[in-house]
Amino acid sequence: MYPSLVDPLTLLLDNTIPNDHADTSQEVWLPETLRDLYGGYPRLGHGEIIANFVASLDGSVTLDASSGTGASAISQAAPGDRFTMAILRSISDCMLIGATTFMDYTTNFLEAGSPFPSLGDEFLKVREHLGLPPTHRLAVATASGRLELDHPLITGAKEPLLVLTSAAGAARLNPCKELEVVAVSEGPPTAQQLVAAMEARWHPRIILTEGGPSLFSQMVREGQITSLFLTIAPVLAGRGSEQRYLVDGELSTPGNVTRGKLETLRQWQDLLLAQYRLLPGKAWSAT
């Protein structure tokens, strides 16, 4: 059981109020308890694909990938970060994660409010209000089809787990009755193919991805991420050989970058929780 929140999040900045007719975002309903703890309502638009990460001050999202000391070690399981994770999961129609991230989970994370079980009933109200099932819909992306088929989240699932993969990956996985395997491509799937498969199946308003970094980087490169929710933890992690960082590889060509427009900034104790709108554009200039 994770500790209770105790201190609500403090809203430091809010730039999400629409300033033109092209802005289609709207407030997402929360029950009063969650709204007060979150410092207001989240504001997102229909068709959003959002990403949620926690990173150290120097950009690491894991301490040691080989030992399983991942995001919770970076955030030190801070209630403010866990609470935000539960908010974003509860308002999202479905989730997309990579195979490595999926295999790192050891407990069921698909029940409403699972990151913050002390308020599980409140998060269930959000799902009910939005007309969503209490258990999160999940798609796992893997090009190779290499999954540990005895993983408890596969063997203990209430319904077959959706796996989006290549033709070769489907051939590897199809004998497993605990999986629903969809080949979305001949070769390694693109982010667009993954998203298209989820849209065709669930017609989601909001898709959430929690990575890992390889999947997130691929989605950013293909322009599939609309908003990034980034918790900045007050730790310096350094650069070990097994660490992972928010972005894998190159994202941009010279002179062009993916820029973030800061939309909200919250604080929980020494954590900063930022919401960025991701926009392709040119790098900063002196003029």
Image (spheres, grey):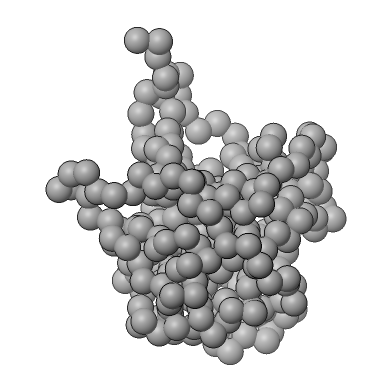
Q: Residue furthest bottom?
A: 158
Dividing the picture into quadrants, the one containing residue 1 is: bottom right
User: Is 92 rendered above or below residue 65?
Assistant: below
Q: How many marks?
A: 0
Q: Residue furthest right?
A: 67
Dividing the picture into quadrants, the one containing residue 243 is: top right
Quarter of the image where the C terminus is located: top left
Residue 203, percent across and down? 31, 71
Residue 72, percent across and down? 73, 58
Please state which of residues 111 and 236 is positioned toward the viewer in this rendering.
236
- Identify the residue shown where x is 66% and y is 67%: 6
224 on left or right of 238: left
User: Is 179 rendered above or below residue 222?
Assistant: below
Please state which of residues 92 and 66 is positioned toward the viewer in this rendering.
92
Residue 225 visible at all: no
Q: Residue furthest left?
A: 21
- Identify the residue shown where x is 39% and y is 47%: 14
- Identify the residue shown where x is 15% and y is 48%: 21
Residue 248, percent across and down? 61, 39
User: Is 111 rendered above or below residue 218?
Assistant: below
156 on left or right of 90: right
- Identify the residue shown where x is 35% and y is 29%: 281
Please state which of residues 105 and 85 is positioned toward the viewer in this rendering.
85
35 on left or right of 70: left
